[in-house]
Image: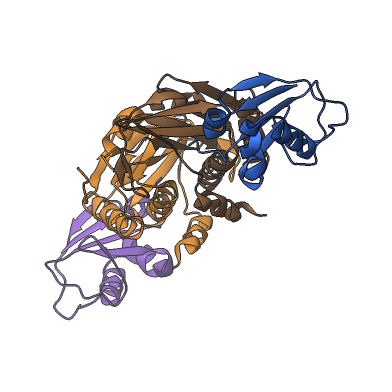
Chain colours: A orange, B brown, C blue, D purple
Amino acid sequence: MIKNSPVIKVKIQNEDFDVSEETRFLQQDNTGAIVNFVGIVRGYDEKNNRTIHSMKLEHYPGMTESEIEKIIFESYKRWQLTGITVIHRVGNLKPSDKIVFVGVSSKHRQNAFDGCNFIMDWLKTKAPFWKVEENNNKRNWVSFNESDNQALKKWKK
Amino acid sequence: MIKNSPVIKVKIQNEDFDVSEETRFLQQDNTGAIVNFVGIVRGYDEKNNRTIHSMKLEHYPGMTESEIEKIIFESYKRWQLTGITVIHRVGNLKPSDKIVFVGVSSKHRQNAFDGCNFIMDWLKTKAPFWKVEENNNKRNWVSFNESDNQALKKWKK
Amino acid sequence: MVIKYFSWIKEHIGESEELIDIPSDITNVDQLINYLNEKDSKYNLLFEKKELIKIAVNKTYSSFDTKVSNSDEIAFFPPVTGG
Amino acid sequence: MVIKYFSWIKEHIGESEELIDIPSDITNVDQLINYLNEKDSKYNLLFEKKELIKIAVNKTYSSFDTKVSNSDEIAFFPPVTGG
């Protein structure tokens, strides 16, 4: 009954995702804990003090998937997860749209919290996605946030 | 447009819950991150090396809600969350059933991860619920896990 | 005074709730446990496993020296195991 | 050699992808950037913002001294901003 290899799903897509469906996918026979992260497009850019009407996401097909798989493999080794899903949307998105789903399952809760947090932190700094915000007729490529590099420090062994 | 007080939901119920619906409830205008924890009844008790056929959960009506509200209030003060939901099932449950949902939303991701993890850790040690496992004709009240006390140490300020 | 029991303490005592009138010289939880222990052997458990048992007075975690009176609701239960 | 550009680098260069034949004495990323920089002013950005630009060779993060040849796929892009 006990499965030793985790279920894994990686999707780069324009379509929305369903959080209940993804939660069910992560549940294996030996799963006791599931932690889901859902990222949402915010309608206000605090750093630059302006409203965002829409945004567009591009990625590097092939490399994006392979970088995410490397992160997933590392998280699996470190926390013995029973399931891992990463779904990242690309193309045109509006404020309030869901943009990313990272879900992990494990036997016990702390591994699920840490595994999910680890994947999000590494995805933010390594997975090749770029956001351009659109505000009336202006386009603004979002710049990398140095705090995302700082966030990685907590995963030093 | 920006709401300053969080949306809050606390439910003790026998019915199952829907993770998508709860995720939507947590999403406010200024939400950028949602972290959900879903606890699942496991069918195998590793400590005692036995299969579990069903379990029953009881609680202390009134006190359970008030202890959960104290934890929620503390997490809100500490992480400026935009939404907090705790749903805990009671009564008869079977392996693979969802047992608890803790979901939080915030502007930025680390507050959501920490807020959700904090609530789960305190719920485990403070909220008056008790599990009895049923295995054929034997009933076994689950005993408190000392590792749950250890988990609280990470929240010392 | 209402006394509530949960989990295996409830099963040992044999009821989930009792209404008891306590003498006016019983003013805290510790005295209440001693009083019950002398009254009936079914309460010995509360006395013997004192350090393992959680106490709530009026639905708030309390300790042996918390004040109690006939108008309070007291609860005895083992460490919690939800989640 | 295929060279890919993303985000504002793509907009600055004016294309998302180019096919370029490089001389055989160009053997690493650093030499490739210098070669492009001398070839056309549109590539100056790669040279000037060297420290800010991420490099991938065959879809793997690489550095200035990573070896390259005409059969490789190179990509230049800014720090990533997904999630």
Which of the two residues, A63 or B142, is positioned nearer the viewer here?
Answer: B142
Hey, which residue is sitting farthest right in the picture?
C25
Q: Residue at x 58, y 44 (%)?
A: A48
Residue A82 spot, x, y in % from top left: 29, 47
Asked if C69 appears above or below D65 in the picture, the reply is above
Q: Do we see residue A43 in this rendering?
A: no
Which quarter of the rendering shows the C terminus of chain A? Answer: bottom left
Which quarter of the rendering shows the N terminus of chain A? Answer: top left
Q: Do we see residue B148 in this rendering?
A: yes
Q: Is residue D51 left or right of residue A84?
A: right
Q: Residue at x 80, y 24 (%)?
A: C22
Which of the two residues, A151 or C29, is positioned nearer the viewer here?
Answer: C29
Residue A155 spot, x, y in % from top left: 45, 62
Q: Is residue B101 left or right of residue C74?
A: left
Asked if D56 appears above or below B156 in the picture, the reply is below
When asked about the image quadrant of residue C13, the answer is top right
Residue B38 spot, x, y in % from top left: 41, 35
Hey, which residue is sitting farthest left in the picture?
D71
Asked if A36 appears above or below B147 in the picture, the reply is above
Asked if A128 appears above or below C34 in the picture, the reply is below
Residue A89 spot, x, y in % from top left: 33, 38
When asked about the image quadrant of residue A29, the answer is top left
